[in-house]
Image (tube, rainbow, N blue to C red):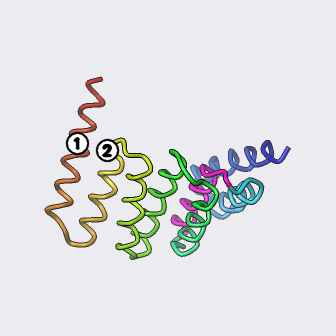
Amino acid sequence: MSALMARRYYTRGITELRSNELDDACQDLQAAVQLIPSYYEARIAYATALLKLKDPPRAIQTLRAGLHYTTSGPGRALLCRALGDALVAGGDFLAAEQAFAESQAVSPQDSADLHDRLARLRARTGRFDEAFTELLAAARLTRQTERT
């Protein structure tokens, strides 16, 4: 029963997030996370709403808590990527680098999305040569996936 309720809260929260009703989205997504703490999709959406409300510390806390419930697999990789984005928004670039590295370690498959996130991080820290290298890797991967 709680899984069904969590799904309803999540669906409603996503709809509110898309229509920029951020306070309502936060309430519904937080309810979904409270019902099922391992519901990483709801946790990532909740952190996204918090970031849009300019509250990186709460988003970071929410995502770090989710890492305790999702110990492996693609869910953990997605949580790490979202955590890296939140840490960049919060200005903790070293921790963001670690979060992205963990994401890559958990899901070693190369992705344009991860290279794009790393490029933004490198640019924010003034490492522009590395940022362009990451963007080039992202472009190559995107081109490869379009061909297949």
Residue 13: x %, y % from top left: 67, 52
103 left or right, relative to 69? left
**How many neighbours does mark 2 have within 10 angstroms: few (below 14), some (14-19), or many (20 or more)?**
some
Which residue is painted at 39% across and 69% down in the image?
88
Front residue (pair 77, 122): 77
Residue 25: x %, y % from top left: 66, 57
Q: Which residue is mark 1?
A: 139
Which residue is painted at 35% across and 73% down in the image?
94
Residue 18: x %, y % from top left: 57, 49
Separation of residues labelled 2 and 1 (CA atoms): 7 Å
Q: Earlier in the sequence, mark 2 or mark 1?
A: 2
133 left or right, relative to 81? left
Look at label 2 and name its amino acid.
Answer: Ala
Q: Mark 1 and mark 2 in contact (Cβ < 8 Å)?
A: yes
Instruction: Answer whether residue 113 is magenta in the image.
Output: no
Which residue is painted at 25% across and 31% down in the image?
144
**Residue at the limit of the structure toward the left, as seen here:** 129
Magenta residues span 38-53
Which residue is painted at 61% across and 52% down in the image?
40
Q: Secondary structure at mark 2?
A: helix
Q: Which residue is mark 2?
A: 112
**Residue at the limit of the structure toward the right, as seen here:** 1
**How many neighbours does mark 1 have within 10 angstroms: few (below 14), some (14-19), or many (20 or more)?**
some
Report the predominant secondary structure element of the magenta stretch.
Answer: helix
Look at label 1 and name its amino acid.
Answer: Ala
Front residue (pair 61, 25): 61
